């Protein structure tokens, strides 16, 4: 009798069990990549602080942001940041260039930002911050690219 036919029943069960598990061991699709391109960088000093929000309820509340990133600025070229730990869904982004390293968006006496800032969809309302509706976008399963332009008020 050939050796492969003489396997003991326990070994057959082991191999059958592996075959039954195979569909569950199949590959899961990689999470989508949110590619963020930040332009309008005016200085190679400081950091760009990026906040990604996943609902209108936590929008512009830094401590409740879905993702916070601090990006070292090394040049005035466009910076690309890839975020790959978000599920598909609706998001909005706010960011600013912290030129002096104090980890906050500096403002003048009347509350106007004195450091460059930007929002997703390049929303630029005057005299107020951009709203969730103006900045929200959809990250689909294939990934998305968002272009942010930093500007002074």
Image (tube, rainbow, N blue to C red):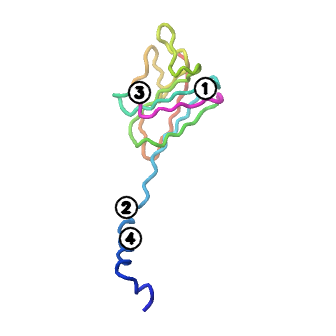
Q: Can residue 69 be found in the magenta stretch?
A: yes
The first of marks 1 and 4 along the sequence is: 4
In the visual, does 90 lie left or right of 118?
Answer: left
Boundaries of the magenta span: 62-76
Q: Tally the numbered discs.
A: 4
Residue 24, numbered circle: 2
**Contact (Cβ within 8 Å) of mark 3 with mark 4:** no
Residue 41, numbered circle: 1
Q: Secondary structure at mark 3?
A: helix
From the viewer's side, name the closer residue of 129 and 74. Answer: 74
- Residue at 42% x, 92% y is 1
Image height check: is 23 above or below 151? below
Quarter residue 71 falls in: top right
Q: Secondary structure at mark 1?
A: loop
The first of marks 2 and 4 along the sequence is: 4
Q: Position of residue 25 (x, y in %)?
A: 40, 61
From the viewer's side, name the closer residue of 103 and 43. Answer: 103
């Amino acid at each position: 009798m050939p050796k492969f036919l003489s396997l003991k029943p326990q070994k057959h069960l082991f191999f059958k069990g592996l075959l039954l598990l195979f569909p569950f061991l199949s590959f899961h699709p990689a999470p989508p990549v949110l590619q963020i391109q930040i332009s309008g960088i005016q200085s190679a000093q400081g950091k760009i602080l990026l906040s990604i929000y996943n609902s209108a309820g936590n929008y512009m509340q830094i401590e409740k942001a879905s993702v916070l990133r601090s990006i070292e600025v090394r040049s005035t070229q466009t910076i690309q940041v890839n975020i790959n730990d978000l599920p598909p869904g609706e998001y909005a982004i706010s960011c600013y260039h912290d030129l002096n390293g104090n980890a906050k968006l500096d403002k003048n006496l009347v509350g106007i930002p004195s450091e460059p800032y930007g929002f997703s969809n390049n929303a630029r309302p005057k005299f107020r911050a951009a709203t969730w509706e103006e900045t929200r976008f959809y990250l689909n399963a294939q990934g998305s690219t968002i272009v942010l332009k930093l500007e002074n008020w």
